[in-house]
Amino acid sequence: MNEVARVDKAFETACRQVGQFLYNFSLLERELDDGIGKLFGIEAGAVDIVTANMDVARKMNVLCSAEVFKAEMPDEVRKKLLVETFSAIWSLNDKRKVVAHCPFSPGEQSGVVFRRAVASKRLHVKDEEWTDLQFQTAFAEADKTRANLGRIIAEMVPYTAAADFSDPRNSGYIAVVL
């Protein structure tokens, strides 16, 4: 194989890995959207209207807040699942920020090198290399997390407001009424 073909193949591999990561993350984000839809009783087509302008952090905060509120004293198994799942989503989202926002090039042995620039008081630029194994681990983590999130959503109870303010979630609205 000549040098040009080798470089092209390495670049195709890097693009495939980046694309596969973003695809897996998009499925996880779709699951978050479905959870918001179930939580508020929004039908499948209309949930896109609500979630289209929400970033992942806002979606997570809505679902996490609802789950923590609903289950103030959750059983230990569910509590552990919630913590593990939401922590995994935050971790995957941090990885997504690198994959989606940093320029990349082929790395060694089917890896990808991301050029990451962070400007906080001063500019820090570094190359961050992800191996093929790191990508495969991230894909598996996304699959497992999506399955766990699906389980949480399946057990989720939709929010229904009580008009008589017996529901403590409605107490904030009394100030608006008065």
Image: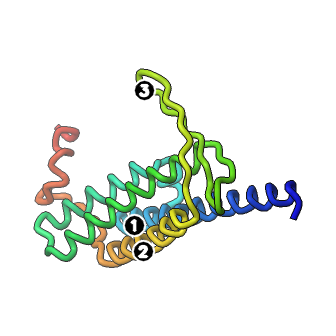
Q: Is residue 132 left or right of residue 72?
A: right
Q: Where on the picture, by quarter, is residue 135?
A: bottom right
Residue nearer the viewer, 53 or 15: 15
Question: How crowded is the residue under tag 2: few (<14 C-alpha within 10 Å), some, or many (20+)?
Answer: some
Residue 15: where, in percent of width, then height? Answer: 70, 57
Tell me the residue that label 2 is attached to. Answer: 144
Tell me the residue that label 1 is attached to. Answer: 35
Residue 101: where, in percent of width, then height? Answer: 58, 43
Q: Which mark is residue 120?
A: 3
Mark 2 touches mark 1? (CB < 8 Å): no
Residue nearer the viewer, 155 or 177: 155
- Locate the N terminus by quadrant: bottom right
> Going 49% across and 25% down the picture, which residue do you hit?
123
- Spatial CA distance of label 3 from label 1 is 34 Å
Residue 31: where, in percent of width, then height? Answer: 46, 67
> Going 36% across and 62% down the picture, which residue do you hit?
88
Of tags 3 and 1, the one toward the viewer is 3
The amino acid sitting under disc 3 is Ser
Label 3 secondary element? strand
Residue 169: where, in percent of width, then height? Answer: 18, 54
Residue nearer the viewer, 138 or 142: 138
Label 1 secondary element? helix
> Going 20% across and 69% down the picture, which residue do you hit?
79
In the image, residue 98 above or below residue 122: below
- Locate the C terminus by quadrant: top left
- Spatial CA distance of label 2 from label 3 is 34 Å
Between discs 2 and 1, the one toward the N terminus:
1
The amino acid sitting under disc 2 is Lys
Between discs 3 and 1, the one toward the N terminus:
1
Count every numbered label the image shows and give the total.
3
